[in-house]
Structures are given as structure tokens and as C-alpha cells.
Image (cartoon, rainbow, N blue to C red):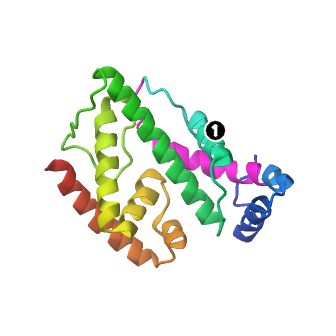
Amino acid sequence: MADDVTAGPEQITNLLKAWERGDESALDRLTPIVYAQLRRIARSQMRNEASGHTLQTTALVHEAYIRLMEGQEVQWQSRAHFYAVCATLMRRILVDEARKRAAARRGGEAQRIVSPGLKLDQLPDVGPARDAEIVALNDALDTLAAIDPRKARVVELRFFGGLSAEESAVVLGVSPQTVRRDWSLARAWLNRELTR
């Protein structure tokens, strides 16, 4: 399948807009172009995967794609916006899976157990052993979103989506320096919140 490097950002944006207008052939042309990047995002989400994890990279991409197809109509702004939406969907899928496994192991009660080793500089181990941490991080991120939505979005894009500072800046309409500053402040806030 083609990588989106062979297609310019404008071409991808044009295909997204055509799909938004109801052109099903645009989706057929778009899928192979963006598939490699979606797999990269999924791989970054699943890095350090523990054995026994129920989702594989391809399954995560396909589940996100299905939810994208079934979801509400989105007004696509750009290629970066598309990948940001996909990253958000993948975060939700992984958190939902973690909540389900944690509830099943604890008879329906999820406990918040966060190890001091949870590092926001690297993607989490998304395996069953870290389910409580993923859920706690998600809950803390929701709290941050109520206080500072942009910083929470930066964490979602960088940590869960695996997007670079430059890619995140495009999505958010700010400079890469602003993204890096927000990333640093958000990580400090989340680390404090998770270890309280």
C-alpha cells in the first residue's frame, strides 16, 4: 500500500473533503494512501506491548477505521486533522479495552494503582499488567482537559497518537515551540496528579 509520503497533504485533504461530500470513490482512493500512517500511529500506541494483549496493531487500525466510518460526520480540515481524529479514536479503543479487562479481573471494580515508573516521555505498555495505569492516565487527562484543553490535546496527540511536535502544531494551529512548552507543562502536571 502507498504511504502518504507519495501523496501530498493537499491531495489527502482534497480526498477527505470529497469523501465528506459523499464521494465514496474518494474513500477508496484515500484508504491505501493513509493506511501506512494509521499503522504507524497504532504501532506507537502499542509500543512495549505486553504479552496477552487482546489487540494487535492491525486490529487497532481496523477498529479505529470502523468507528470512523460509523461515527458522526466530520468536517475534515486537513490531513493532520484526519490523523488527529484517528489518534483520538485509538486512545478511546485502548482505554475501553483496559477498562474492560480491569473490571473483569476485579469483579467489576477498577482500582487506581499507578506505579511511580509510569513515564509520559514514552508510550505506555498497553498490556493487561498496566490497565489501571492507562485508565488512571486517561482520567487525569480528562481532568486536565477541563482545566486546559489545549495541553490535554497536546498529550493526546503526542502520547496516545504518536504525533511529532510539528504534526501536533499543525493540528492545533500553533507553533511547534508552543506544543513543546505545553507538552512539558502537561507532563509535569500529569505526573504530579498521578502520583498524588
The x and y percentages for residue 96 are 44, 37
**Compared to 109, does 196 lie above or below?**
below
Three-letter code, disc 1: His
Q: Residue at x 84, y 57 (%)?
A: 23
Q: Residue at x 34, y 55 (%)?
A: 142
Q: Which residues, given as a range, are shown in magenta? A: 30-51
Q: Quadrant of residue 77?
A: bottom right
**Compared to 137, does 144 lie above or below?**
below
The x and y percentages for residue 109 are 27, 28
**78 with respect to 103 (left or right):** right
Q: Main secondary structure of the magenta part?
A: helix
The x and y percentages for residue 98 are 39, 34
The x and y percentages for residue 28 are 81, 49
Q: Residue at x 52, y 52 (%)?
A: 87
Q: Residue at x 50, y 59 (%)?
A: 163
Q: What kind of element bears circle 1?
A: helix
* Residue under numbered circle 1: 62
